Image: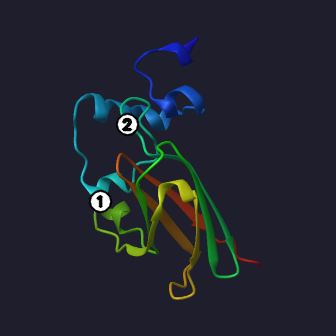
Amino acid sequence: MVSNYKNLNTYGQYFDLGVVDIMPSIAHYLNVKLPDSVAQEIDGTSFIGPVSVASLKTIYTQNHIDISWKALQKTGKVKVWLTTTNNFKTGGKDTYHLLGEVDLNQQHFFADVKAYPSEFYKVVLQAKDNTLNKWVVLSQAK
């Protein structure tokens, strides 16, 4: 049974792993420190080593994004970032706005995005031991 493997962290033991989790796990194993601009783009979570947050979920409603996550540690803070750009795709840098910093155990943040009108948003959670991202793409009524 995989959950008994001694090197798996809490995320690796209790969450559904995906192929996107392999690269951050290899980076952790090799002690590769990724710059924030790269960590904000990674679509996976390491299944070895310390992890603060997992299972990021977002729901857009009426100029707000309801953001939730699972805290894998009992203490600490999480920073909630937002961007409306995707310059990273073409080798550039995205401009992130800090929406707030809350206790990790709060597991919820309600973001007012009226000041950031866009057809898409990228939400990034930055905690002590890992970073998560989630895209919010608004569908246009035709």
Q: Name the quadrant containing residue 136.
A: bottom right
Compared with residue 108, is residue 112 higher up or lower down, i.e. above or below?
Answer: below
Q: Earlier in the sequence, mark 2 or mark 1?
A: 1
Please indicate whether residue 67 sits to the left or right of residue 44 in the image.
right
Residues at circles 2 and 1 in contact by the CB criterion of under 8 Å: no
Across and down, in percent, residue 43 comes to 46, 47
Tag nearer the camera, 2 or 1: 2
Q: How many marks?
A: 2
- Which residue is the site of mark 2? 50
Type of amino acid at the residue the image marks with label 1: Ser
User: Residue drawn 34% across and 52% down?
Assistant: 39
Q: Secondary structure at mark 2?
A: loop
Looking at the image, residue 90 lies above or below residue 73: below
Near mark 2 (Cα within 10 A), the count class, few <14, some 14-19 or many ≥20, is some
> Residue shown at 46%/35% (left/top)?
21
Residue occupied by mark 1: 37
Residue in the image at 49% along x and 66% along y: 122
